Image (cartoon, grey):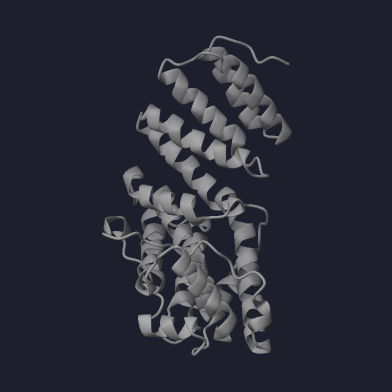
């Protein structure tokens, strides 16, 4: 990929946010390579450019014009594999065993396409391999081990202990999120990642990535009976959704917040909120969510959902 256009964008945002070259390129490429990319003196793999920009909270949208025909085709194929796997992981599609084998074959090829001193293709392949392991019924320990190997390609496992502000690429965020869900990281270890996402992510990216993480953290706090933090994290996620365009997780987050407030003895108006949550679940056609909030209102709050 031609370095001039995208290198200037990386340079602009790096200087705007006052990051060193070492902070941005840590685990991706050398500082010397980073300098040459910024100055237009080094061509760079499109995945490298994507990752450098994503650490600055930006995307490569609109820079496809700088790709050669071969690079564009490689990027198109990689994005097609990613979209297919993401749809499968979300449950939007149920591929056959043959389709799974084809995807794994693509990932094997992807993992061997690391460019220069970057292992980003291998990291991406390891991440999706871990997610496919999970869907195939592998143990949590096996999935966690694969995720840890993926993270170590570009990021130390104890990233939260770094003396300076740590920057995260989009794939690193996905890996850390899954490791948190697996129980590898504690709530306290997520704080620096949350601060990074809040500070540098655009609103649409916060909806996609920050809200699910805040939801998982609030759930973990509920399990640990840390109700004040449960209410706080759920409230932060609700605020992100309210300033965006999606209502994904909205019912679940309000329900989490209600349960936390009830546990804290701050139950004023919770019956009305439960009615609102019920109708949010109704809009989403989530019959199980409707049943749960109705049972909660009756058994815990002693009230009926208003219809």
Circle count: 0
Do we see residue 127 in this rendering? no
Q: The N terminus is located in which quarter?
A: bottom right
Q: The C terminus is located in which quarter?
A: top right
Residue at screen point 37% across, 85% down: 32
What is the x, y in percent for residue 40?
A: 52, 86
21 lies above or below 256: below
Residue at screen point 39% across, 65% down: 151
Do we see residue 32 in this rendering? yes
Residue at screen point 67% across, 72% down: 62
Residue at screen point 43% across, 48% down: 181
In this view, the residue in front, 91 or 221, is 221
What is the x, y in percent for residue 113?
A: 51, 83
What is the x, y in percent for residue 9?
A: 55, 73
What is the x, y in percent for residue 255?
A: 55, 28
275 lies above or below 242: above
236 lies above or below 83: above
Quarter of the view holding residue 303: top right
In this view, the residue in front, 196 or 220, is 196
In this view, the residue in front, 242 or 109, is 242
In this view, the residue in front, 58 or 266, is 58
Q: Please state if 109 lies on the left or on the right of 153 as rendered.
A: right
232 lies above or below 203: above
């Amino acid at each position: 990929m031609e370095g001039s256009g995208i290198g200037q964008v990386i340079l602009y945002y790096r200087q705007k946010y006052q990051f060193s070259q070492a902070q941005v390129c840590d685990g991706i490429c050398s500082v010397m390579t980073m300098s040459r990319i910024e100055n237009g003196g080094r061509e760079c793999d499109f995945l490298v450019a994507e990752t450098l920009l994503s650490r600055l909270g930006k995307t490569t949208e609109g820079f496809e014009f700088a790709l050669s025909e071969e690079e564009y085709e490689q990027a198109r194929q990689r994005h097609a594999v990613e979209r297919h796997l993401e749809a499968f992981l979300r449950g939007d599609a149920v591929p056959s065993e043959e389709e799974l084998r084809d995807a794994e074959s693509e990932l094997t090829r992807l993992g061997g396409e690391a460019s220069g001193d970057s292992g980003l293709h291998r990291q991406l392949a390891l991440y999706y391999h871990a997610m496919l392991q999970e869907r195939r019924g592998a143990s949590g320990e096996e999935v966690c081990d694969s995720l840890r190997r993926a993270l170590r390609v570009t990021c130390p496992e104890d990233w939260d202990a770094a003396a300076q502000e740590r920057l995260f690429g989009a794939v690193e965020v996905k890996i850390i999120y899954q490791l948190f869900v697996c129980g590898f990281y504690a709530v306290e270890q997520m704080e620096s990642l949350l601060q990074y996402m809040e500070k540098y992510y655009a609103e649409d990216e916060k909806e996609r990535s920050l809200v699910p993480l805040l939801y998982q953290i609030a759930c973990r706090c509920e399990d640990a009976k840390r109700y004040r933090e449960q209410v706080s994290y759920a409230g932060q996620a609700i605020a992100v959704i309210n300033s965006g365009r999606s209502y994904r997780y909205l019912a679940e987050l309000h329900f989490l917040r209600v349960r936390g407030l009830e546990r804290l003895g701050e139950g004023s108006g919770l019956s009305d909120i439960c009615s609102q949550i019920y109708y949010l679940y109704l809009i989403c056609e989530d019959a199980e969510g409707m049943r749960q909030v109705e049972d909660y209102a009756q058994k815990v709050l002693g009230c009926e959902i208003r219809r």
